Each structure stands twice: as structure tokens, then as C-alpha cells.
Image (spheres, rainbow, N blue to C red):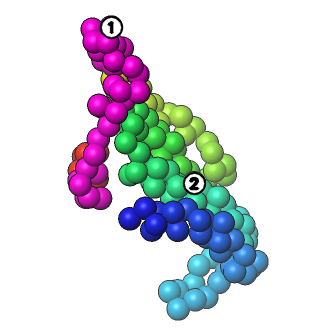
């Protein structure tokens, strides 16, 4: 599994360069159908914008599903931000891609930030009660799921 993840991370520069295979035209007819870029006026620009959002999102998903530290839930904030940005980029009627996204992230941040603070407070309470180092407590708080789907179930 580690080799597959390392390979996925290693090919991200090649995935980012996939936008170069998209023609610099307003309308592109493929076997999936015809796509017309209304806002960007160029499919090349749209593809470049999407890859600049999808690749970091892809890497964040790898990170959140492989992270075993107690603070891994905080990664949901940038994941939500990139997901929102992708939706905005795909919505052709908007004039700016990064417009008012903080208002959509506030509910997510309102849950995650206090949760992380409470976990951190719990760790420091255990440090004061028990004579353990911070590394030993982090190791104790790590989640070790058996497979990918159990890790997904931890989030839901």
C-alpha cells in the first residue's frame, strides 16, 4: 500500500501537466460531448485552473487518509476549501473563482477548530497527570485502522 501511495505522489507533476494536452479553443468536441468554455474563453485556461485545484486536493486526500496524528481532522478545512474552489471554477456564471469562500468554510471550521483544541487540551491534561512525553501521548492517540474503508468510516 505504501508503494502505491508513493507512486501516486510521485506522478502528481505528470498529472499537473495533463492540462497541456487540452487545446486552446473556446469549444471542444470530444466523444463525451461538446464542452464550451463561457467564462474562461479557453479550455486550456479552464484545464490549467482545474488542475491547480485538483492536484492539491488529491494530495490532501492522500495525506488525510494516511495521517495517524491526532490533529488530522484539521486537514478537512483545506479539503473543503479546494472542493469549494473546484465547484466555483466549474460554475461558468461566476466572475471570480475565489469569491466569499470563507463564508462557506465557517461551519466546517466551527466544528473542526474546537475539536482540535479539545483534543490538544486532553493531551496536555494527560501530560500533567501522567509522566509521559508528548511523543508517547501522540503515539497513544494515533488511529490505526485496518484498511482504507475503516479510515473513511472514521470521518462519517
* Image disc number at residue 50: none
Answer whether labels 1 and 2 touch (C-beta < 8 Å): no
Q: Is residue 123 above or below residue 80?
A: above
On screen, residue 88 versus residue 74, left or right, reads: right
On screen, residue 24 versus residue 122, left or right, reads: right
- Label 1 to label 2: alpha-carbon separation: 38 Å
Between label 1 and label 2, give the one nearer the viewer.
Answer: 1
* Residue 149 lies in the magenta stretch: yes
What is the magenta range? 122-151
On screen, residue 32 versus residue 127, left or right, reads: right
Instruction: Please tell me whether the stretch drawn in magenta is mainly helix, strand or loop.
Output: helix
Residue 13 in percent (x, y) is at: 66, 66
What's the residue at 65%, 71% (across, down)? 14
* Label 1 sits on residue: 128
* Label 2 sits on residue: 56
Q: Quadrant of the N terminus?
A: bottom left
* Residue 18 lies in the magenta stretch: no
Residue 70 in percent (x, y) is at: 36, 33
Displayed quadrant of residue 49: bottom right
Q: Is residue 18 above or below residue 128?
A: below
Q: Earlier in the sequence, mark 1 or mark 2?
A: 2
Displayed quadrant of residue 24: bottom right
Label 2 crowding class (10 Å Cα cut-off): few <14, some 14-19, many 20+? some
What's the residue at 63%, 45% (across, down)? 98
Element on which disc 1 rests:
helix
Residue 16 in percent (x, y) is at: 65, 67
Q: Nearer the viewer, residue 12 or 55?
A: 12
Amino acid at each position: 500500500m505504501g508503494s502505491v501511495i508513493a507512486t501516486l505522489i510521485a506522478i502528481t507533476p505528470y498529472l499537473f501537466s495533463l492540462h497541456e494536452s487540452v487545446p486552446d479553443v473556446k469549444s471542444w468536441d470530444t466523444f463525451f460531448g461538446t464542452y464550451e468554455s463561457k467564462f474562461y474563453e479557453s479550455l486550456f485556461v479552464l484545464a490549467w485552473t482545474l488542475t491547480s485545484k485538483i492536484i492539491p486536493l488529491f494530495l490532501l486526500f492522500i495525506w488525510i487518509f494516511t495521517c495517524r496524528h491526532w490533529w488530522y481532522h484539521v486537514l478537512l478545512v483545506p479539503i473543503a476549501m479546494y472542493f469549494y474552489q473546484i465547484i466555483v471554477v466549474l460554475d461558468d456564471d461566476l466572475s471570480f473563482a475565489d469569491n466569499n469562500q470563507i463564508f462557506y468554510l465557517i461551519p466546517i471550521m466551527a466544528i473542526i477548530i474546537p475539536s482540535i483544541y479539545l483534543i490538544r487540551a486532553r493531551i496536555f491534561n494527560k501530560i500533567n497527570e501522567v509522566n509521559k512525553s508528548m511523543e508517547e501521548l501522540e503515539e497513544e492517540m494515533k488511529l490505526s485502522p485496518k484498511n482504507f474503508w475503516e479510515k473513511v468510516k472514521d470521518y462519517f
